[in-house]
Image (tube, grey):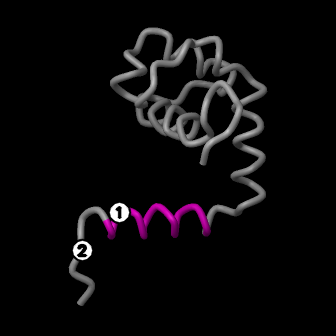
Amino acid sequence: MPTERAVEPGTVVLGLSLDTLSGRSPLSRLAECLAHQDTALLLGPAIAPDALHDAPVGRVLARLYATGPMQGCTACAVRAEQALHFDKR
């Protein structure tokens, strides 16, 4: 979803997911965690670590909370099925 923000919401969610898979640091250290990573390779666009401060991450988390976890999980499952063509029998 295109926005006028420095970092797209999907990129923030992907960064949070990678942070969780790598050992889970506090949200306040997300930028620090990704500072030593090749963000262009991991996330798509190259992102300056200081762009992932508390405000954009907080906005994304608020939108995720408002949407609800079930809707987000369902959307991920549908996208995975479309990409991988699971046998649903």
In depth, the one of 71 and 83 nearer the eye is: 83
In depth, the one of 20 and 4 nearer the eye is: 4
Say the numbered circle drawn on residue 86.
2
At a point 40% along the width and 63% down the height, the residue shown is 79
The x, y position of residue 35, in whole percent, is 50, 10
Dot 1: element: helix
Q: Residues within 10 Å of mark 2 (few under 14, many from 20)?
A: few
Dot 2: element: loop
Q: Is residue 60 magenta?
A: no
Say the numbered circle drawn on residue 80.
1
- Residue type of the residue flagged with mark 2: Phe
At a point 37% along the width and 16% down the height, the residue shown is 38
Classify 58 as above or below 38.
Answer: below
Classify 40 as above or below 48.
Answer: below
Provide the residue span drawn in magenta.
71-82
- Residue type of the residue flagged with mark 1: Ala
Quote the CA–CA distance across marks 1 and 2. Answer: 8 Å
